[in-house]
Every structure is written in C-alpha cells, then in structure tokens.
Amino acid sequence: MTAALTDFARLSINDATTQNWTLAEEIVGYAARGIRSISIWRDKLAACGRDRAVAMIADHGMRVSGLCRGGMFPRETAAERRAAIDDNLRAIDDAAALKAACLVLVVGGLPGSSKDIAGARAMVHDGLAAVLDHARKANVKLAIEPLHPMYAADRACVNTMRQANDLCDALGAGVGIACDVYHVWWDPELESEIHRAGRDRLFAFHICDWLVPTQHLLLDRGMMGDGVVDIRKIRGWVEATGYAGDYEVEIFSAENWWRRLPGEVIEVCKERYLSIV
Amino acid sequence: MTAALTDFARLSINDATTQNWTLAEEIVGYAARGIRSISIWRDKLAACGRDRAVAMIADHGMRVSGLCRGGMFPRETAAERRAAIDDNLRAIDDAAALKAACLVLVVGGLPGSSKDIAGARAMVHDGLAAVLDHARKANVKLAIEPLHPMYAADRACVNTMRQANDLCDALGAGVGIACDVYHVWWDPELESEIHRAGRDRLFAFHICDWLVPTQHLLLDRGMMGDGVVDIRKIRGWVEATGYAGDYEVEIFSAENWWRRLPGEVIEVCKERYLSIV
C-alpha cells in the first residue's frame, strides 16, 4: 500500500482548475496557499504576457510543471498541418521561456470530415517528428497525453498508454508521456504500460477523479476522492518507476468547481491531496 | 474496399432502436418492412410474454440475432453475486426459447462504492464461469460485449476486444464476443483483435455511429453515416474472418431517433444500411 503524502512539495495546480482567475491571480493565489508548482494554459499565458509571467513565477519562487498545450497535428490540408507545426514551435519557445517541465500535447483527432483514424494517427507521428528537433534544441520535453477514448474523434486519437509508448519508441529521446488518471484509469494495461514508460518517459502525472454518473463528456471531472479512480494505487505504480516530478491537479468542472471561489478550490485540492492521492 | 450491401437479408434491428414500440408492434412492424431479424431486450420480452413472443416471431418468419442482456456480475456481496448468476441462468433459458443467436452480456462495472476495477474484472470471469455450463447445455452462445471505456465504472469493465478475447481464451468454448462499432471504433488494435476473435468467436456485430459532438454519454448514439465511424471498413474486417451472422442496428438516442415514428426510423436504417454500412 502506497503511503499517504504528507506535504505539498510536489503538488502542482493546473490552472484550468481555477478557471476564473487570471494567470497573475493564480501565481499570487497559489503561492499564498503554499503551492510551489503551476501548470499553465496558453490562453492565460497570452493574456498575461510571457515576460510578465516568467518574472512573476520567479518572484514567487514557483516552478512550471507543464505548458498546455501543443499538438492538434491532424489537419485536412498540408497548409493547415504546416500552420499547426508552426504553432507547436511557438509553444515550445513558450515552454522554454517558462522552464516548464514539459509541453503537454493534446495530439488532435480526426481532421475535418475524415473517418480515417489510422491516417490521423500517422499525421500525429509526422507532426511530432517535425517539431522534435526544435524541442530538443530548446531543451523542452514533449509530453504526449493519451486522452480518454471518448475524445478520439475531436481531441486526441492517441488514447492509451500503449499507443503513447509506441509513439515514443518510434520517435526517440525527447518525447514522453503525460499520464492523467482521468483518461487512463480504466485501462487493463495501465500498470504494465506505466512500467514500460518508466522514469525517463513519464514527464507529467495528472490527477482528478471520474464521477459516476458523469454528466458531460468534457466539463464534469471530479475532485480527487469524489469518484471511482484508485488514485493512490496508480500513484504507487508511477512512483515505482522512480518518477520524481509533480502531482498535478487538473479539474474541468463547469457546474461545480469552476463555480466556487478559486481559493476554496485550492484548499479542497490540498486536503484531498493528503487524504486521497 | 468492401462492397456495399445490396439487400436486407442480414439486417437485424435491435429493438432498443424503436424504443416506443412494444415487442409485438416491433415484430409486426419490422416484418412488414422486410426485416427478417430482431434483437430483443428482456424488459420488452417480459412485457410481451415469452411464449407469445416465440409464437409471433415464428409466425412472421423472423429470427433473433440476440437477447439483451445478461451480465452485471460484479456485486458487493456473495448473495448479490449469486442472484446475478441466477438471473443470467434465466436469461440463458429465454435465449434458448427464442433460439437467439447469442445472449449479449453487458458484464457490469464497479460494484457499490468499489474502486477495484481489477477485482470487478475477476468477478466477471467468475460469473461467466458459473453460468457457462448451463449455457453450453442449452446451446446458447454467450457474447461478451466490450463497452466503451466511458462505461467502465457503471456498466462494463470489459472495454476492449483484447480484453474480451483474453476472457474467451480463459473460459473456452461457448463464450464469444458481440462487437459493436460504437464501443470499439477508436481502438488501434481493433483490426488485429477482430482477426484474433475470428469467425468462431464473433457472435454478433452491432452498428450505429459516433456523433461529434456527443451530447450524452448513454443516449446520444448516431444513425449510420451521421458520425465518424468507418463502418464499412470495420465490416470488411469482420467479414474477412468469415462472419456469417447479422448486422444489427442498435441506436440509443433519446433526443433524436427515439422521438421519431419507429417506422420512419426503420426506413432510414434500411437506406443507410445500403449506402453506408
């Protein structure tokens, strides 16, 4: 049995969790509550300004567990695929400026009206291959996030840890995995594929919970402990690899957690981090 | 490229598709529209009465492609698991009376407040093992239906064709698979696991479509052609095994198809069967 966590040294909050705060408010508000790590979405980064964000993060003694998100490689036309690659190159530069532990990749689903999921997966491979050299030179790790199969059509056609590991095998150093319990908890191969990924390939570990019933495919994630995921068991599998990164809370919850005061949400995250994670 | 279908000889309608008809109305209404095969849910069978259903099906020259559903094996207590097994034994008897091509099994999810999905999967194995002898003697095929991973918690903890094949390997003859494109279309191992299942293990093939966006986790399935599933490609993989069973349309659609006149829905099914499936 994996022991409970006893402090917040490795707790990161993904800033989608505090949807109604700006990035500046988050840096101040997280730091004031003893959170040392943040994961940042690019829209909030753009609204804040990159230089200001970098300075504020340094001033508050924080680190960045991830930048969300690159990816979205499959597109209908070559010009659109090129634009996606350019956008990923800019995301890599942002991640480098933030000294982010990784750039999280939501790889993209079926382009346009396509029904060719194998073709989309090939575009993901090719898109990753096209940006990998730039990422390596910038010292930015690319973290493929396998998304739950219910997002295969519209968000990510990489849906299991096995697929992500296979992509890493094909692409080589610099490409790894962001493992989010929400997306992979159901997978009978989860333990073996976490082991296969190992410390060198596990770039991020995201936590929240799967609610029963789930009311909305995208915006009804649960707080740790409110659902059915055995988060501590999965954390044990991750730690068995030697993973030394952060435990990042990411909760999309339009009808519940996003309606509460962000400071209150962080306090609940902290409480559940000790009792559940 | 798999050729289009040219007649309705192998078209079956799962009677959940015509939610607002009784079983008697379905037998008459399907037969009148040239449908020769029906898949029946047990609640409608009970409302009709088994003897009457058997007689009506024979009178209308129809066959039964499946009885829905057995399964739901994981339960919190031994007494509840025993009751689930007893219910499956009755379902097997019903399937035998109907001469159904198979009893479709929705195996069940996490029992009670459990977070132990491996334990639930073990209960599925044990439940199947407990009813298999009765099924063999009754000459009823047990078709495990891998359900989409979004149902892992509350409906079925068997979520991929690989898992279903592994269970079949463990249990032996008489246990096979109901392959529903809605649940498995995203799986990168789908083609290889259909091949692995083969003709002897593919007891049913269900069709509908995955809509983008999907509005509800359970009740927003699409008509063939309205979503992103390459149904014809998957049918080609199934036919390559030598599968000679029916192609069964099963659409749960509270806000669209269930609100239309059932006769109209069947006509659309037939049209799409030729143009899309």
Image (cartoon, coloured by chain):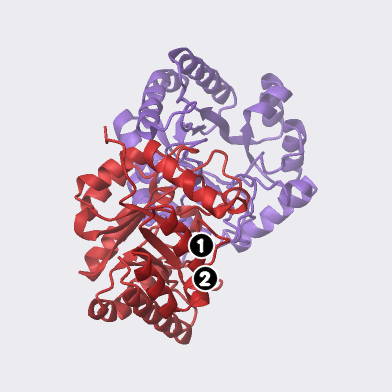
Chain colours: A purple, B red
Please give the residue where the numbered disc 1 appears in the rendered image: B153
Query: Which disc number belongs to residue A127?
Result: none
Q: Residue at x 67, y 21 (%)?
A: A50
- Say few, some or many: other residues with alpha carbon within 10 Å of mark 1 (under 14 / 14 to 19 / 20 or more): many
Q: Quadrant of residue B1?
A: top left
Q: Where does the image place residue B112, in percent across and percent down from the top left?
A: 55, 73
- Say few, some or many: other residues with alpha carbon within 10 Å of mark 2 (under 14 / 14 to 19 / 20 or more): some
Query: Which disc number belongs to residue B114?
Result: 2
Quadrant (top left, top right, bottom left, bottom right) of the C terminus of chain A: bottom right
Specify the amino acid type for callout 2.
Ser
Q: Is residue B192 above or below residue A277?
A: above
Q: Where does the image place residue A167, in percent across and percent down from the top left?
A: 34, 34
Q: Nearer the viewer, residue B16 or A185?
A: B16
Specify the subunit that label 1 lies on: B
Specify the subunit that label 2 lies on: B
Specify the amino acid type for callout 1.
Ala
Query: Reading the chain from its start, which is encountered first: label 2 or label 1?
Result: 2
Residue A38 lies left or right of residue B251; in this view the side is right
Q: Where does the image place residue A91, in percent across and percent down from the top left?
A: 55, 22
How far separated are the C-alphas under marks 2 and 1? 9 Å
Q: Where does the image place residue B169, in percent across and percent down from the top left?
A: 22, 64
Residue A262 lies left or right of residue A205; in this view the side is right
Residue B8 lies left or right of residue A212; in this view the side is left
